[in-house]
Image (cartoon, grey):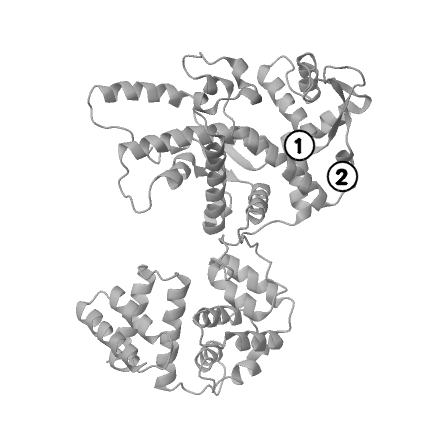
Amino acid sequence: MTGDDRPAAPPVRLPAEAELAREALAAPLLSHATRLARWAQEGVRVGAGGELPDGRLAEAAALLGLDGEDEEAQEHAARAWDLAVDTGLLEVREDDGAGDGAGTAVPGEELALLTRGSPADVLDLWLDGLEAVLAEAAVPGLEDLLGEDGRLDPASLDPGALDLDALDWDPEEEADLLDGALANLYLLTATDPAVEAGAMVPLPVLAASMVVPEGMEHPTDDVLEEVSEVMVRLDEQFRLLEPAGIVVHHPMDDALAEEADGAGAEDGDGDGDGPRLPDEEEVARYGMVRLTPLGLYGVRRRMLEAGVHAPAVGDLAGEDARTLLDALPGHGEEAARTEIELWLARRAPLEAARELLAAARGDDRRAPGRRLACQQALSLVGAEAEPALREVLDDGHLGGLARVWLSERGLADVPAPSEEMVFWLTVDTLAAQLSVRQGGDGSQELRELVRGLVDQHSGFFDKAWRVDHPATGEVLEAMSRVHPDRRAAKDARKAAYRARSRG
C-alpha cells in the first residue's frame, strides 16, 4: 500500500511515448482499421449498427491482403471495421429518410490524429480501441452461449431480451477474469527479470496464479479442474487480444482438446490419476503469453484510472530526495538502480549526496528503509561527494553508513566506529530489511544475515538490547524467529523483552 492507502503495484519500465505510439500504429487491428477508414473515403453503405454488410466483407478482407473468401479473414476484417467505428476513425452518418437506420460510413476526425497528432494522441486512440477489444474478448462466442444442445433461441440474444441466467454467463465475472489475468501478467513483468526481458508465461502457470489458494502445495482435483477451465477461457480471450498489440500469444495446441476427452474416459475407468498440471516438457503445448511493452502501458493506464498506484521507472527523477528514498524499498534491484541513476543525472554529485543524507535522517518507522535506500543511492555517487560524507561522521544516524562509504573507496583518515555505533547500525539495517519485506522474516537471506551477525559478535544479545533505536525490540524479536540455533533464539527473545521493558 502507498502512504495514501491506495492499492499499489510495483514500478515498471516503459519505452518512450514515441516508441509506444509506433507500436500502436503497427498493431494489426489498428493498422487494418486505419486502412479501412481510408478505403471509405468516398463513403461506404453500412447497416443500422454501423456494421459492414456481408457483401463487402470479402472486399474489405482482400484490401487488407487477406483471402477474401476465407471466413476467418472476413471475421478479422469485420473486427477491424468495428474498431474503426468505435474509435472514431470512421463516422457513420444516417441516411436522410431511409427509415431503416442504415447509413454511410466516411473517415472520421480521429483519422487525422494518426498522421498529424502527437504520440499521446495516438496512444489515447489506441486505448479507446483497447477498451472495445477487451469488452469483446469478455463475451463468449455464440456456440458457447448456446451450449451443447444448441436449444437456446438465437433471437433471445437480442440485447433487450438477453437472459443471462439462461445463458449461464456472467459478463462481470468474465471481465473480471480477463482483468485479473492481465493484472497478474503485469505483476510478473514488473517483478520477474526474465519475463520483463521477454520470456513467455505458460497459461497453466497464469491460470494457477489466479485459482490456486496461496499456500496450497498440492491442489485438489476440483482446483485443478478449475485451473484447466480458466486456462481454456484465457486461451480464447488472448487469441482475440493479440491483434490489438497488447499481448504476444502462442495458442494452446488444438489437439489437446481431443486428448483431454480421452484422458477423461480413462480416468473414469479408475486409474486414479485425476486432473493434473502439465509438466515442463508439455507446458508449451498448453499455450504461452506475455504482455508487450504496449500492453504493459495499456494495463498500467487502466490501473491508474481504477485508482491503483502504478508507478513507472523514471517517475521519481524530478522528486525530492525524501520522496525518492521512501519509494525505493518497493522497487526491484534493477528498477531501483535505474531510478537512482535518473535522479542523480539531474544533480551535481556533492549536492545530491547532501540531499540524500538529509532525507535519510529520522526515527519514524520508514527511516531505516530510507537509510538503506540512501546507501544504495550513494554507492552510485562518485568521489566528488566525499565532503558530504565527512560532514556526517559524528551523526548518530548517518555516521556508520558514512564510514562504510569512505572505507569502500579506500579513502584515508576514516575514524573507527564506536561499538555503540556498530550496534545501532546493525539494528537499523535489520529494521530496514524487515521493512522491505513488509513484516515478513522468513527469507534465507535474512536468516544468514542474522546468524552471521550473532556469530561475529560475542555476547551479541547482551549488548544489542541496550541499543537506543526505536526498532530494537522488534528486530530482536524477529531474530528470535529466524535464528536456527534454539539457544540463540531464546537469548534473542530475552533481549527483546529487556529492550521493550527498558523503553
Q: Residue at x 51, y 63 (%)?
A: 327
Which of 385 and 317 lies nearest the eye of the viewer? 317
In percent of width and height, residue 450 lies at 30, 69
- Mark 1 vs mark 2, CA separation in Å: 13 Å
In percent of width and height, residue 242 lies at 56, 32
Q: Quadrant of residue 341?
A: bottom right
On the question of residue 107 being in view, the answer is: yes
Q: CB atoms at circles 1 and 2 under 8 Å apart?
A: no
On the question of residue 457 being in view, the answer is: no
As drawn, the residue found furthest toward the front would be 161
As drawn, the residue found furthest toward the left would be 487
Against 146, is 315 above or below?
A: below
Quarter occupied by the C terminus: bottom left
The residue that disc 2 covers is 113
Against 318, is 62 above or below?
A: above
Q: Is residue 411 left or right of residue 116?
A: left
In percent of width and height, residue 104 lies at 77, 20
Against 117, is 471 above or below?
A: below
Q: Is residue 420 left or right of residue 301?
A: left
* Residue type of the residue flagged with mark 2: Leu
* Residue type of the residue flagged with mark 1: Leu
Asked which secondary structure carries label 1, the reply is helix
The residue that disc 1 covers is 30
Of the numbered discs in the image, which one, if any, rests on residue 473? none
In percent of width and height, residue 167 lies at 45, 21
Q: Residue at x 56, y 72 (%)?
A: 381
Q: Quadrant of residue 365?
A: bottom left
Which of 27 and 493 lies nearest the eye of the viewer? 493
